Image (cartoon, rainbow, N blue to C red):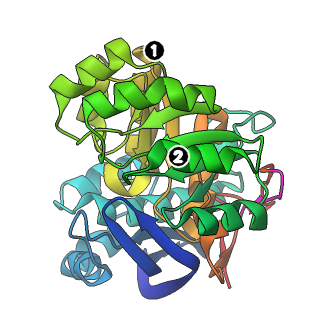
Amino acid sequence: MQIAIKKYTLQLAHTFTISRESHDTQDTMIVALSHKGKTGYGEATSNPYYKITVESMTAEIEAVREAIEEYDFDNPENFYRHLESLNLEKFTLCALDLAANDLYGKLLGKPLYEIWGTDNSHYPITNYTIGIDTVEKMVEKLQEMPWPVYKIKLGTQDDVAIVRELRKHTKSIFRIDANCAWTAEETIQNAPLLKDLGVEFLEQPLKADDWEGMAKVKAHSALPVIADESCIVESDVEKCGPYFHGINIKLTKCGGLTPARRMIKKGKELGLKIMVGCMTESSVGISAIAQLTPQLDYVDMDGSLLLKHDIARGVQILDDGKVIFPKLPGSGIELL
């Protein structure tokens, strides 16, 4: 097996702001794994919150390149166990695992959702994310991208007022992501007001380790709460069970499709709603997420829609949120 690594700096269509940071570009690492004449592609973005850079991920892979290239690839699950033995960070694991899954599908000549025995005729529509900005700019973004479901990033002094103003301009479903910016009291107070404004659920309102606060929120919130920063890896799913109504799985944070599928299974066993989210990836990462959609209740895979220019072809997300799955097997990815 051969490895190729390339860094891209993705240009965003708009400055993207959440409660803790703003950025106009997103660095990302694309990994290509080639075997028996086929090439699979994987992706992991840099992330200052988790202290991950493309350079740090690349250095990790280069340090174990020989151990990876000498591996006799048979399937993604066995390959993942081999990668785990190399003590790689989750973001790096993700890029390699996505590439391995794409490669596996291409070797078998089937899309991943078919290999997994799922039916892609039914899947949730992705939301489109509106980052924190002036109310006027947020309204402009709504009008620029009419969409059936919006995720609204909040974490300001006027969060309910922002949603009230946005509601005047669309009848679409709202989902709120406070990115750890609220207290339990704020969340409980805001929830009924936001519910009346057509909000479907709240994503990670409290700090990731505020379990006492989340117990209060789950008991008293008028809206369901979905874990994000509190649910990083497989062991977090069971921990989140008593405190949340659902979990948002990020492939980069958990280590790829292989552990994500196990997290989905465990979450369903616990009666949790299941969402998979993105980290502003290109169509390489988004197309991998799309393969999971038949298994999900919610999905946030708008990363490629937030870019000025994509670097790959894969799934196509239409104006109404519907998805066209590519005919190419695996995750259906081709680099441009």
Kindly identify the residue that appears in the image at 32 percent across and 63 percent down: 91
Q: Secondary structure at mark 2?
A: helix
Q: Main secondary structure of the magenta part?
A: loop
Label ID, residue 271: 1
Q: As drawn, is 167 to the left or to the right of 15?
A: right
Quadrant of the snapshot with the N terminus: bottom left
The residue lying toward the viewer, choosing from 186 and 276, is: 186
The residue lying toward the viewer, choosing from 120 and 77, is: 120
Residue 292 appears in the picture as rendered: no
Q: Is residue 176 above or below residue 247?
A: below
- Magenta segment boundaries in residue numbering: 315-320
Kindly identify the residue that appears in the image at 23 percent across and 42 percent down: 207
Q: Position of residue 224 (x, y in %)?
A: 47, 23
Give the mark, 2 or 1, whose residue is nearer the N terminus.
Answer: 2
Q: Position of residue 97 (x, y in %)?
A: 42, 58
Q: As drawn, is 80 to the left or to the right of 103?
A: left
Quadrant of the snapshot with the C terminus: bottom right
Q: Position of residue 62 (x, y in %)?
A: 25, 82
